[in-house]
């Protein structure tokens, strides 16, 4: 296998890293307290778990608003545009190539941090799953005001169902996501990148479709 | 650290700061020290019940009409009414005197003086079962004139015996017996002249001992409330607010508020601010409908959960209360004689004349939707003996706007019913024809049914029944309140029996949970296998894959 040059690249800005770890802490706490409220295990006690879950949940709403602001003002949203290009190669890499020590088919770049699989997953997460979770969570929290909000037709079991299903989906994402951090250049290189912002990546050109400006990548 | 956007460093820093501020301000509200300030409901209630100075303009010991040589109860009544001219007319209209509540559209007369049935002594047989009349506010077992001193007398004496003895000794020429007569006369006069507003022992004389003994009926009303401490009852505690019964059970023309016998007792949940003349004082009258601190989740519960549900964690906390009465076991004898046995509380758990009892202390209530009405079965209503007959049961459902989850004592009974007419039967118990004398069900049921004016086929058996008592006294201090997770829990939730709504912590969607956890495990397994494969193929990390998280 030919040796590939590596370059140290600044991938994650300070806010991005902060947001990532804040998000991690919030999600971790929400999953823990949420599943306790759901009756999965005893931890803080129901009362405390509810209070913490509510407080963190509301914090999350505010923090997420900042994220939305950031993602649009910085143009980072373009990193989430989905594509099918090289999708198959990425899937093939994770299910086969990785075991043979092959190179990743879509190396990270400053203006193209996400491979096609990540684009799809993170877009679904940020644009669908997290909003669903936030909306259902907010409704859950505001249960007593539903009539005032004109939502008298809602029932708590509908909201609870959606919110619980969303929680399972996020938990599953976290499992896979945490595992995937170990698949970098070294076991910890991805994690270190999210801490320092810098990651050693393979040299190479960013393809045109991956870049910011290209909003409609050709499949 | 190098930064490609050094110039904008200030932006994320400000964001970070503002987010952290938000984070901590939200949590600090939720974790504010609970003892820092009081719940607004307590402050409101304190204001509503500031010591009311009731002054008295009559010294009854100086009233001429009460200095008479009374020889009978009705003479005392006459003396009272000679000044309180309307009191008798008022009182004879009240349920305390008539023992009749109302007639339904079928003409059934509710009330213990009517067709109503319970699962204790079952029926007063239209006031003909004289044993019941020990609690009727007349003189002795007669229903002629009201004994005002039942409720307004500070000194309780045995009136019947006193008048009888006085009658005998007063006629005697023996100076010694005359002396005894004078003493009795003095006792009677002293009792007649110590007139008060009703105290706990006046109300408690009957209401603590309903059903024939201390704590038999209610569970939240027994003699432990004569002088309770705050731990037993925050309102009545002599070391606390020291409320008398009449503090909440207000009175209009001798009609005493607070009865929850049949009709909605309080359909509109008013505070005293809205209506300071409200006839029925509920928790909310003083504490408001959002009594807890503004951020407390408990305030969000008050629309569906009655205050009592959380604030009375258990009833019968000092004295035991009767929880079941099986009449079918009565009539057994030892060596041909009636006998009794006692349980661990020193209470009778078997009596030949009454049957088998069970007593319990520190009982967790059962919870039902309750709109203030109790549906009850009278001696004239058909029953289905194949099921447990709910002689009385709370009315309400989750969809009922006025209904809230309310705590109840359930008293289990096994009592006689007519196998042909399918009705509950009210046996005559006391007196020469009564079951307690004859131990003859057939005769007692025949006489009782005749008194009630209902047919009796002669064929009877015993049926399982339940009877409910709303639990509203014995409000515990805040630190003993029912914890969230006593209801919001999978196992042994206090509200296990209430269905038709989703309750966090108690309920789940089994299919969703199963699928969810299976998927979680499958993914754990998946990444585990993936990772192991990477280790065994010894490639990743060495040959420099550059992958993405």
Image (cartoon, coloured by chain):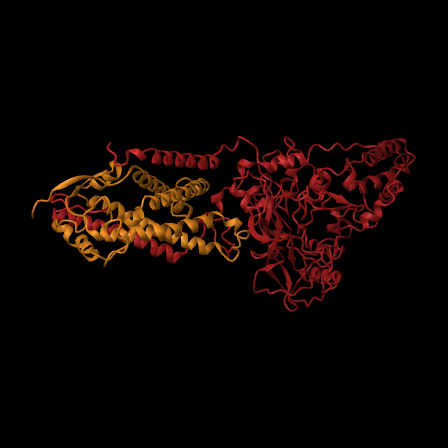
Q: Residue reaching furthest right?
A: B173
Give residue B318's quadrant in the image.
Answer: top right
Q: Nearer the viewer, residue B432 or B266?
A: B266
Q: Nearer the viewer, residue B248 or A89?
A: A89
Chain corresponding to orange in the figure: A
User: Is residue B250 rendered to the left or right of residue B28?
Assistant: right
Residue B235 shows up from this direction: no
Q: Residue at x 71, y 57 (%)?
A: B110
Q: Residue B281's image quarter?
A: top right
| Residue A62 appears in the rendering | yes
The spot of residue A23 in percent (x, y) is 34, 42
Depth order, front residue of B549/B107? B549
Query: Which tint is chain B?
Result: red
How far across and down, in percent of the image, does residue A92 sit? 17, 56
Residue A192: x percent and y percent? 23, 38
Q: Position of residue B40 (x, y in %)?
A: 59, 36
């Amino acid at each position: 296998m030919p040796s590939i040059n590596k370059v140290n690249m600044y991938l994650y800005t300070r806010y991005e890293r902060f947001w990532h770890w804040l998000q991690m802490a919030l999600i971790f706490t929400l999953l823990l307290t949420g599943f306790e409220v759901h009756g999965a295990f005893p931890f803080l006690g129901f009362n405390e778990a509810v209070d913490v879950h509510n407080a963190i949940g509301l914090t999350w709403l505010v923090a997420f608003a900042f994220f939305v602001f950031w993602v649009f003002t910085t143009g980072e949203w373009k990193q989430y545009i989905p594509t099918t290009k090289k999708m198959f190669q990425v899937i093939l890499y994770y299910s086969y190539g990785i075991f043979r020590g092959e190179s990743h088919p879509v190396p990270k770049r400053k203006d193209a941090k996400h491979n096609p699989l990540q684009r799809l997953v993170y877009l679904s997460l940020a644009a669908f799953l997290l909003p669903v979770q936030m909306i259902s969570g907010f409704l859950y929290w505001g249960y007593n005001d539903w009539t005032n909000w004109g939502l008298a037709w809602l029932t708590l079991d509908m909201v609870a169902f959606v919110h619980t299903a969303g929680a399972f989906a996020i938990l599953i994402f976290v499992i896979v996501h945490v595992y995937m951090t170990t698949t970098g250049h070294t076991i910890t290189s991805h994690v270190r990148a999210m801490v320092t912002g810098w990651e050693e990546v393979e040299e190479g050109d960013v393809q045109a479709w991956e870049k910011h400006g290209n909003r409609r990548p050709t499949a | 650290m190098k930064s490609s956007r050094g110039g904008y460093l200030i932006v994320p820093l400000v964001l970070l700061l503002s987010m952290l501020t938000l984070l901590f301000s939200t949590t600090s509200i939720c974790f504010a020290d609970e003892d820092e300030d009081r719940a607004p409901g307590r402050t409101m209630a304190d204001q509503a019940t500031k010591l009311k100075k009731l002054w008295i303009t009559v010294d009854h010991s100086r009233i001429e009409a009460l200095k008479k040589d009374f020889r009978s109860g009705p003479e005392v009544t006459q003396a009272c009414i000679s000044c309180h001219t309307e009191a008798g007319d008022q009182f004879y209209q009240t349920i305390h005197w008539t023992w009749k509540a109302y007639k339904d559209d079928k003409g059934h007369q509710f009330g213990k003086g009517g067709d109503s049935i319970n699962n204790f002594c079952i029926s007063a047989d239209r006031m003909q079962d004289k044993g019941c009349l020990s609690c009727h506010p007349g003189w002795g077992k007669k229903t002629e004139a009201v004994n005002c001193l039942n409720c307004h007398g500070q000194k309780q004496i045995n009136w019947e015996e006193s008048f009888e003895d006085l009658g005998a000794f007063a006629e005697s020429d023996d100076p010694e017996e005359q002396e005894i007569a004078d003493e009795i006369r003095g006792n009677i006069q002293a009792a007649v002249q110590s007139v008060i507003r009703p105290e706990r022992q006046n109300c408690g004389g009957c209401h603590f001992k309903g059903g024939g003994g201390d704590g038999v009926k209610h569970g939240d009303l027994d003699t432990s409330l004569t002088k309770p401490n705050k731990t037993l009852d925050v309102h009545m505690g002599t070391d606390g607010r020291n409320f008398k019964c009449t503090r909440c059970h207000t009175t209009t023309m001798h009609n005493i508020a607070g009865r929850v016998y049949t009709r909605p007792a309080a359909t509109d949940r008013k505070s005293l601010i809205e209506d300071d003349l409200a006839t029925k004082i509920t928790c909310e009258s003083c504490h408001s409908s959002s009594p807890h601190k503004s951020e407390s989740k408990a305030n969000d519960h008050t629309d569906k959960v009655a205050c009592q549900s959380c604030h009375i964690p258990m009833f019968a906390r000092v004295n035991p209360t009767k929880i079941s009465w099986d009449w079918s076991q009565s009539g057994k004898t030892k060596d041909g004689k009636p006998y009794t046995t006692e349980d661990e509380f020193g209470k009778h758990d078997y009596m030949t004349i009454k049957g088998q009892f069970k007593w319990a202390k520190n009982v967790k209530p059962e919870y039902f939707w309750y709109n203030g009405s109790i549906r009850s079965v009278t001696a004239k209503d058909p029953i289905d003996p194949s099921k447990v007959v709910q002689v009385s049961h709370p009315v309400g459902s989750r969809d009922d706007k006025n209904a809230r989850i309310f705590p109840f004592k359930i008293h289990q009974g096994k009592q006689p019913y007519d196998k042909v007419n399918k009705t509950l039967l009210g046996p005559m118990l006391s007196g020469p024809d009564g079951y307690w004398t004859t131990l003859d069900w057939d005769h007692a049921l025949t006489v009782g049914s005749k008194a009630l004016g209902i047919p009796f086929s002669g064929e009877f058996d015993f049926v399982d029944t339940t009877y409910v008592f709303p639990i509203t006294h014995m409000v515990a201090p805040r630190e003993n309140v029912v914890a969230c997770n006593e209801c919001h829990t999978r196992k042994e939730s206090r509200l296990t029996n209430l269905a038709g709504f989703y309750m966090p912590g108690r309920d789940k969607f089994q299919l969703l949970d199963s699928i969810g956890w299976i998927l979680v495990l499958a993914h754990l397994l998946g990444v585990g296998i993936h990772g192991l494969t990477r280790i065994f193929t010894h490639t990743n990390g060495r040959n420099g894959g550059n992958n993405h998280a």
